[in-house]
Image: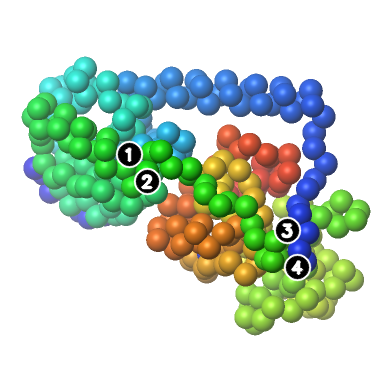
């Protein structure tokens, strides 16, 4: 082993005008092709992108094997030639486990996140982002295949379970995103985001004072509030404008969260469709709030702002 430095109102349904069926069918076909190509590319191969591995882990409900290494690490190079490329190992990749090789020199952020202090090290995480196992040091082929066999049955979620049970929102809850009569999308249920984030008060905004961000309108109590918002909108808007990040990650659907079901992460509030989704988020917020992608969302036409906004 070689030592290295340890490196988040109104109760109506959100429904926007859908695209015409021809365009939608075309988009769905293109999306399926992209997803299939990515799945084929990941089978029997090590990935080099943590974000790709995370997405595939959630889609396939299988764990991730994070293999931390470096070009200058002799034990890493030995494992590369004798173990990682062996048929008995690669046959697991993309099927029972998503394997991703992390270069310690090129990805110091992951080194710090997973507190890696020596190489090679492997961290196994479930499709819920929680750590399942950790292995420090090199391994023989037989030891490594035993790791893979163990990891494939240790995922953090039940493979036979519905990944989004009871995802439909309670009718008594109030949705974050609303559609007004003129078709405009209104965020935070019509409440003022400045009053909520700055003053910690739920105060109704007025249609007289409107500010927009990412194509979503927000109501304010005064021109002063609106100017404060427009000067730094990301400081006040909810994560994903109120769409449930757990539903987005696990179900690949954009669903409006409820203002009664919020949670904060890194100074930003996120909203959820169900208490169970909020609990999942609170157990590992970084897994759901960071590195999100709009790729593969089943209903992008309902939330067009997701296509252009930075989800992180």
What kind of element bears circle 4?
A: loop
Residue occupied by mark 1: 64
184 or 105, which lies in front? 184
- Tell me the distance, in whole angstroms, between the alpha carbons under discs 3 and 4: 8 Å
Which one is earlier in the sequence, the residue at label 1 or at label 3?
A: 1
Residue identified by numbered label 3: 177
Q: Residues within 10 Å of mark 3 (few under 14, many from 20)?
A: many
How many numbered callouts? 4
Image quadrant assignment for residue 306: top right
Q: Which residue is mark 4?
A: 9
Q: Are marks 1 and 3 in contact (CB under 8 Å)?
A: no
Residue at the image point whose x is 53% and y is 63% from the top:
275
Circle 3 SS class: loop
- Expressed as whole percent of the image width and height from the top left, the position of residue 237 reads 66, 63
Q: Earlier in the sequence, mark 4 or mark 2?
A: 4
Residue 188: % across, % down = 71, 65
Residue 196 falls in image quadrant: bottom right
- Say above or below: 304 vs 148: below
Whole-percent x, y for residue 291 in the image: 48, 47
Real-space Cα separation, disc 1 to disc 3, in angstroms: 34 Å
Which label lies toward us, 4 or 2?
Answer: 2
Indicate the position of residue 161 as horizontal and vertical percent values. 43, 42
Disc number for residue 116 = none
Q: Quick one: label 2, few (<14), some, or many (20+) residues within 10 Å?
A: some
Residue where numbered disc 2 is placed: 157
Which residue is at a point 10% across and 36% down the rendered structure image? Answer: 138
């Amino acid at each position: 082993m070689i030592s290295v430095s340890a490196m988040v109102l109104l109760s109506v349904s959100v429904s926007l005008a859908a695209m015409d069926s021809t365009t939608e069918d075309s988009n769905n076909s293109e999306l399926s092709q992209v997803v299939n190509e990515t799945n084929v590319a990941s089978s029997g191969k090590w990935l080099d992108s943590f974000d790709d591995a995370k997405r595939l882990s959630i889609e396939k409900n299988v764990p991730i094997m994070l293999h931390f290494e470096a070009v200058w690490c002799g034990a890493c190079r030995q494992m590369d030639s004798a173990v990682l490329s062996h048929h008995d190992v690669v046959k697991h990749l993309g099927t029972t486990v998503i394997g991703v090789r992390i270069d310690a020199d090129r990805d110091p952020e992951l080194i710090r996140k997973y507190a890696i202090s020596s190489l090679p090290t492997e961290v196994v995480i479930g499709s819920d982002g929680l750590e399942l196992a950790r292995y420090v040091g090199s391994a023989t082929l037989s030891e490594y295949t035993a790791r893979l066999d163990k990891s494939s049955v240790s995922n953090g979620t039940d493979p036979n379970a519905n990944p989004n049970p009871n995802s439909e929102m309670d009718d008594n809850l109030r949705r974050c995103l609303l559609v007004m009569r003129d078709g405009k999308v209104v965020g935070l249920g019509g409440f003022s985001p400045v009053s909520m984030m700055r003053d910690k008060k739920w105060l109704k905004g007025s249609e007289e004072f409107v500010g927009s961000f990412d194509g979503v309108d927000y109501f304010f109590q005064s021109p002063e509030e609106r100017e404060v918002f427009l000067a730094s909108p990301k400081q006040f808007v909810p994560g994903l404008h109120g769409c449930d990040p757990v539903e987005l990650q696990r179900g690949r659907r954009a669903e409006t969260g409820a203002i009664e079901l919020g949670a904060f992460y890194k100074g930003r509030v996120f909203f959820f469709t169900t208490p169970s989704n909020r609990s999942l988020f609170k157990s590992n917020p970084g897994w759901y709030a960071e590195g999100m992608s709009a790729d593969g969302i089943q209903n992008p036409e309902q939330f067009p702002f997701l296509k252009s906004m930075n989800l992180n």
